[in-house]
Amino acid sequence: MKISPQSARMYFAVAIDGEPGEAMQIDRRVRGNGLLFKTTDPKEAMKNVLMLGAPDRSIREIIKRL
């Protein structure tokens, strides 16, 4: 992954793994670099975060239509 200096802001989420009270580590089982998503669009970033926390398929369908 390369970070572009032309982008004013970049939004991303990284998968982490660890037990409470212990050091967190990047979870590379999702992707080799641990990234769940990467974007320069704040609206897309918000939708991605909401999708990650959606409890079921019906909520994900609502979020997709936003």
Image: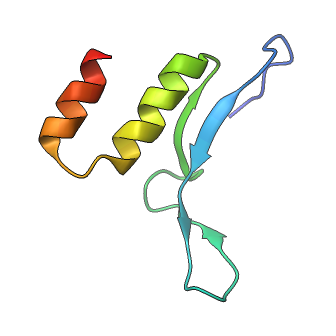
Is 13 above or below relative to 32?
above
Q: Position of residue 16 (x, y in %)?
A: 56, 64
Is 61 above or below relative to 34?
above
Pick out the residue farthest to the bottom: 21
Q: Pick the quarter of the image with the N terminus.
A: top right
Is 8 situated left or right of 13 in this image? right
Q: Nearer the viewer, residue 65 or 41?
A: 65
Tell me where residue 50 sits by quadrant: top left
Residue ID at (58%, 44%)? 13
Residue ID at (77%, 27%)? 3
Pick out the residue farthest to the top: 6
Q: Tally the marks.
A: 0
User: Which colour scheme appears in the figure?
Assistant: rainbow
Is 36 above or below relative to 26?
above
Q: Pick the quarter of the image with the C terminus.
A: top left
Q: Nearer the viewer, residue 23 or 61?
A: 61
Is 60 above or below relative to 16?
above
Pick out the residue farthest to the right: 5
Q: Position of residue 24 (x, y in %)?
A: 65, 74
Q: Position of residue 35 (x, y in %)?
A: 56, 45
Tell me where residue 60 sits by quadrant: top left
Residue ID at (55%, 85%)? 19
Residue ID at (49%, 21%)? 44
